[in-house]
Amino acid sequence: MDINEPDWKVFRKLRDLALERYCQRVLREVQLTVDKTGGSYHDRYLKLWELLRNRDKTIAVASNDPRRSQAIIQLLNIVAEDLLTHEELNQFSEDTRERIEGITRSRDS
């Protein structure tokens, strides 16, 4: 499932942007978990640990070890997390957008 060279360049740029957005989202969740969760400090710590562990797994499949052979899969995960705008996705070629849309549709069916 290799991605073409121009789309690979777009992917590398947008992957970094998506990673920043995801980290921003997680840090907001961390703040809420620490500040708003009742219970003991230990309870809050455990909830925070679980949150970070789960979010780390999610972002790992979308951003770790980027390679052209994995770009479509990672892009699918970035799209599933709603980390890119429609305009940003339109930077990809029509072929890549169609592949993403087709796989997304089949996932949703």
Image (cartoon, rainbow, N blue to C red):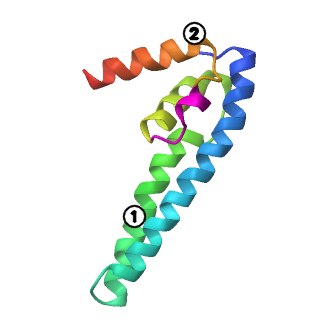
Task: Look at mark 1 in the image and give the residue it sits on.
Answer: 51
Q: How many marks?
A: 2
Q: Position of residue 101 (x, y in %)?
A: 44, 18
SS label for mark 2:
helix
User: From the viewer's perspective, is residue 47 above or below residue 72?
Assistant: below
User: From the viewer's perspective, is residue 36 above or below residue 62?
Assistant: below
CA gap between label 2 and label 1 equals 36 Å
Question: Residue shown at 27%/87% (left/top)?
Answer: 39
User: From the viewer's perspective, is residue 83 above or below residue 31?
Assistant: above
Q: Which image quadrant: the C terminus?
A: top left
Task: Look at mark 2 in the image and give the residue it sits on.
Answer: 95
Front residue of this view, candidates 100 and 65? 100
Q: Position of residue 84 (x, y in %)?
A: 55, 38
Q: Amino acid at mark 2?
A: Asp
Q: Residue furthest bottom?
A: 40
Question: Residue shown at 32%/17% (left/top)?
Answer: 106
SS label for mark 1:
helix
How dense is the environment of label 2, judged by Cα within 10 Å: few (below 14), some, or many (20 and up)? Answer: few
The picture quadrant where one finds residue 29 is bottom left
Question: Residue shown at 55%/23% (left/top)?
Answer: 72
Q: Amino acid at mark 1?
A: Leu
Lower sequence index among marks 2 and 1: 1
User: From the viewer's perspective, is residue 83 above or below residue 73?
Assistant: below
Q: Position of residue 76 (x, y in %)?
A: 48, 29
Residue range highlighted in magenta: 82-89
Apparent side of residue 50 relative to residue 79 in the rendered image (left or right): left
Residues at discs 2 and 1 in contact (Cβ within 8 Å): no
Q: Residue furthest top?
A: 95
How dense is the environment of label 1, judged by Cα within 10 Å: few (below 14), some, or many (20 and up)? Answer: some
